[in-house]
Image (tube, rainbow, N blue to C red):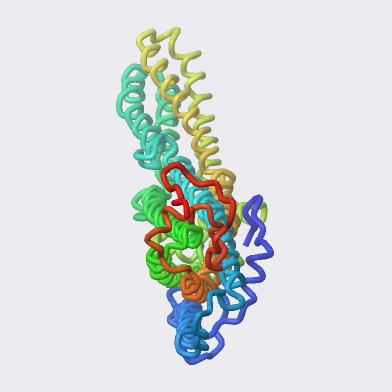
């Protein structure tokens, strides 16, 4: 199979394609793209199951860590006012994890945009291919120009050529030339009808593009909502640590657990999609050729011509185009001969001859445009653009989203382990804190406030003289 122009499988495609695959019985599965096969479906589901296993292990680790923290914590000595050692490290480790999560969110936004760009390029290529097939607009039938030419020629045979035969009955050689033009026109009409290869095909590139765009819109929106949710969780958690607000930290801990589950779930879907896409992109021609043959019922010669598009594959329409072009040239020469010989003797023949020449000129113009549209270069270029959008931009965006999910899962797991220890170090609420200047304390220090001498008192909160 020929390689579409400008498309080469990337290093990520080769790397992901080389990864081993196994079904539910852990038997090896070939890495060829075969979504209709049960073994291949099980291999992709096993990739998703690995993400579920990672979620289960992380939840078990967090639960064990928190149980050990709650049940195995050494009792504080009575009257102790200083925080336990390592309290600052716990808080700063939680802050660092949340900042890593924010970095992952930025990567996720970039990956989501890159994936959307790749899918948009795929949709644009499908719409352009449909425009090439229709040749007029996205609603017209691809054989409209053919039918127009055939109808014009049939009309010319029924009216103008019949009129000429009636006018030129006295000259048998002119009648023979007129009947020869009639036969040539009928032959051209018959040949052109065979060029409408897309007529009656149930597969519509427009419908495929609309379905892809519809799914992509909801995928893009779902990821934007997930990214915004995690961003809000990170920001409000940092705010809770800064304000030393236990209720806000507790709420954000529950939300972090929810986002952790969503991150692992998205990671599984992204990994399975990236693996399946790499299998497809490593050798896309064979699968698309077989699928198109099944969906359209077109012959292998036509499909090979458009998918390969090189000198090794001949144009399946070349013979019909050559016969039609020669017939049109013969009709043109015969009409010129009739105009020279018949018009001086039969002036009434001038009008049907001029009408025939006008029809012939329009038919030749449409014929040359049809020859250009039937050439494989345009559709093959659209095919390459679709592959580049899907296998380069979209796959790269999926890998960035996979990195986002990985960073998010790690950051949230670290935060879930650190947040309970952090809020345990928060100082108890003092009703007179508003008059003690506690709002001037540093937010990330967990030591209890010591009375500071020589503080300037505020007008609304003056100290009483001793």
Front in this rendered view, residue 65 or 121: 65
Q: Where is residue 300 in the image (x, y as percent from the top left)?
A: 50, 61
Q: Position of residue 103 (x, y in %)?
A: 58, 58
What's the residue at 33%, 17% (across, down)?
A: 167
Q: In this view, does 3 lie to the left or right of 169?
A: right
For the question of whether residue 277 can be seen, the reply is no
Front in this rendered view, residue 22 or 173: 22
Front in this rendered view, residue 4 or 275: 275
Up the image or down, 237 lies above or below 375; here it is below
Check the image and name the residue furthest to the front.
Answer: 466
Say which quarter of the image contains residue 307.
bottom right
Say which quarter of the image contains residue 177.
top left
Q: In this view, does 137 lie to the left or right of 241?
A: left
For the question of whether residue 447 can be seen, the reply is yes
What's the residue at 37%, 52% (across, down)?
A: 214
Front in this rendered view, residue 62 or 264: 62
Q: Position of residue 7 (x, y in %)?
A: 64, 54
Q: Position of residue 215 (x, y in %)?
A: 38, 56
What's the residue at 55%, 38% (across, down)?
A: 372
Q: How many labels does the image show?
A: 0
Up the image or down, 198 lies above or below 420; here it is above
């Amino acid at each position: 199979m020929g390689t579409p122009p400008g498309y080469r499988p990337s290093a990520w495609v080769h790397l992901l394609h080389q990864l081993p695959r196994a079904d539910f019985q852990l038997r090896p599965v070939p890495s060829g793209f075969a979504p209709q096969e049960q073994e291949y479906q099980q291999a992709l589901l096993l990739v998703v199951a690995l993400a579920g296993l990672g979620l289960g292990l992380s939840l078990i680790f967090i639960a064990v860590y928190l149980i050990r923290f709650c049940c195995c914590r050494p009792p504080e000595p009575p009257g102790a006012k200083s925080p336990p050692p390592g309290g600052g490290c716990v808080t700063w480790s939680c802050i660092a994890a949340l900042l890593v999560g924010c970095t992952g969110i930025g990567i996720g936004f970039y990956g989501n945009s890159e994936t959307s760009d790749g899918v948009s390029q795929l949709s644009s290529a499908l719409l352009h291919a449909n425009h090439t097939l229709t040749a007029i607009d996205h609603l017209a039938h691809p054989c409209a120009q053919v039918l127009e030419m055939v109808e014009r020629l049939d009309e010319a045979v029924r009216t103008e050529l019949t009129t000429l035969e009636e006018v030129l009955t006295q000259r048998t050689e002119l009648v023979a030339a007129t009947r020869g033009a009639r036969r040539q026109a009928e032959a051209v009409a018959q040949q052109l009808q065979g060029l409408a290869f897309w007529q009656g095909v149930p597969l519509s590139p427009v419908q495929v593009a609309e379905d892809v765009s519809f799914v992509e819109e909801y995928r893009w929106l779902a990821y934007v909502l997930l990214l915004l949710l995690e961003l809000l969780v990170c920001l409000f958690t940092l705010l809770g640590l800064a304000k030393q607000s236990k209720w806000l930290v507790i709420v954000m801990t529950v939300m972090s657990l929810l986002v952790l589950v969503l991150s692992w779930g998205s990671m599984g879907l992204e990994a399975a999609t990236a693996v399946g896409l790499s299998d497809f992109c490593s050798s896309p021609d064979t699968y698309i050729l077989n699928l198109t043959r099944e969906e359209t019922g077109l012959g292998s010669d036509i499909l090979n011509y458009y998918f390969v598009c090189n000198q090794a594959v001949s144009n399946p329409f070349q013979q019909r185009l050559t016969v039609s072009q020669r017939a049109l040239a013969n009709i043109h020469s015969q009409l010129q001969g009739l105009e020279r010989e018949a018009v001086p003797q039969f002036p009434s023949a001038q009008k049907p001859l001029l009408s025939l020449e006008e029809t012939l000129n329009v038919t030749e113009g449409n014929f040359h445009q049809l020859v250009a549209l039937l050439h494989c270069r345009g559709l093959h270029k659209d095919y390459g653009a679709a592959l580049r959008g899907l296998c380069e931009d979209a796959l790269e965006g999926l890998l960035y989203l996979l990195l986002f999910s990985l960073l998010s899962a790690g950051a949230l797991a670290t935060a879930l382990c650190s947040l309970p220890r952090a809020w345990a170090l928060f100082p108890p609420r003092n009703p007179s804190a508003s008059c003690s200047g506690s709002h001037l304390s540093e937010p990330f220090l967990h030591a209890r406030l010591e009375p500071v001498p020589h503080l300037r008192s505020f007008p609304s909160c003056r100290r009483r003289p001793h």
